[in-house]
Image (cartoon, helix red, strand yellow):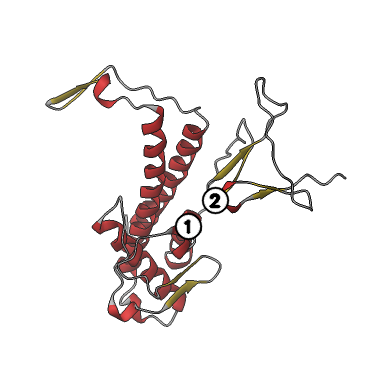
Amino acid sequence: MTPREMHIRHLRAAEGQFRLATAVRLAVTFERQPLDLPLQWSHGTHAVRYSEIALSPEESDFAAWNLQRSATFLMASAALEAIRSTIANPKTRSDHRVVAAYQISRMIRNAFAHNPFSPIWRIDPDCHDRQFEVPDVIRLDTTGLDSTPFDWRHYGGPLALLRLSQFVRREVLCDNEQPDNVIPLPERVYIQQGDLILMKVNEIPAGAVPADVERLPDGRIRLPGGHVIRPRKEE
């Protein structure tokens, strides 16, 4: 296996972990994720009982969120190593997309590496007050970011990192192999916007309590987090 092939495989693996973590988080949110664990588990010289590793619903919700977040860090790390290993002096490339992909993945990796649960931006002096962008993929403005808490709004969020990984894999490593597996549609229909998740239902669930909401003049209803929902237009 060549270094290029190895990094393509690593990027695909990181993307796969992000996709799985997203599925787990969605299932945990709707309480459809089984939390079964062994009653007794031995490995090497150690053994644990169920009570030591069991998860409460609250713990699983927080763990699922952290799992998805750490998966984005893994994609950034894999993208950085792929660029470093295949491109000499990526900081000085004439292709500004490659420079941006390198610098953004490097700074995100550094933010997580120092404190993965409370990442902090560590911006090098030569990257202060600069904008790095891979058009239609990811953008990072470093102005005033150094030593501030890491926030998804700074770079566009988890899907921006998925696109960054795909950009490095396809455009930098020239991975043109298309998956040939057919993935079935999910049993339930979900729509997600940011952290707001909606699930389609065919009828109002038994025991549902009507909500007293105020409609905006155009019929929209405000939801938490700055979201709004609007009535469906009739054909």
Front in this rendered view, residue 125 or 226:
226
- Foreground of the two, 48 or 234: 234
Q: Which residue is mark 1?
A: 157
Amino acid on which the number 2 mark rests in the picture:
Gly
Up the image or down, 206 lies above or below 98; here it is above
Q: Quadrant of residue 55?
A: top left
- Of the 4 image quadrants, the one containing the C terminus is top right
Q: CA distance from mark 1 to mark 2?
A: 9 Å
Vertical side of 9 occupied by 184: above or below: above
User: Which residue was labeled with disc 2?
Assistant: 194
- Pinpoint residue 170: horizontal percent, then vertical percent: 48, 62
Picture layout, residue 89 above or below residue 198:
below
Residue 59 is marked as none
Q: Residue furthest left?
A: 45
Q: Are marks 1 and 2 in contact (CB under 8 Å)?
A: yes
Look at 45% across and 36% down and name the residue there: 24
Residue in the image at 28% along x and 16% along y: 39
The residue at the point 64 percent across, 36 percent down is: 189
Between discs 1 and 2, the one toward the N terminus: 1
Between 39 and 185, the one nearer to me in the picture: 39
Q: Amino acid at mark 1?
A: Gly
Callout 1 secondary element: loop
Q: Quadrant of residue 99?
A: bottom left
Q: Nearer the viewer, residue 187 or 214?
A: 214
11 to the left or right of 110: right
Query: Neighbour class for label 1 at 10 Å: few (<14), some, many (≥20)?
Result: some
Q: Position of residue 140 (x, y in %)?
A: 44, 70
* x and y, in percent, of residue 86 in the image: 33, 68
Work out which quarter of the rendered image holds the N terminus and state it. Answer: bottom left
- Secondary structure beneath label 2: loop
Q: Is residue 97 left or right of residue 204?
A: left
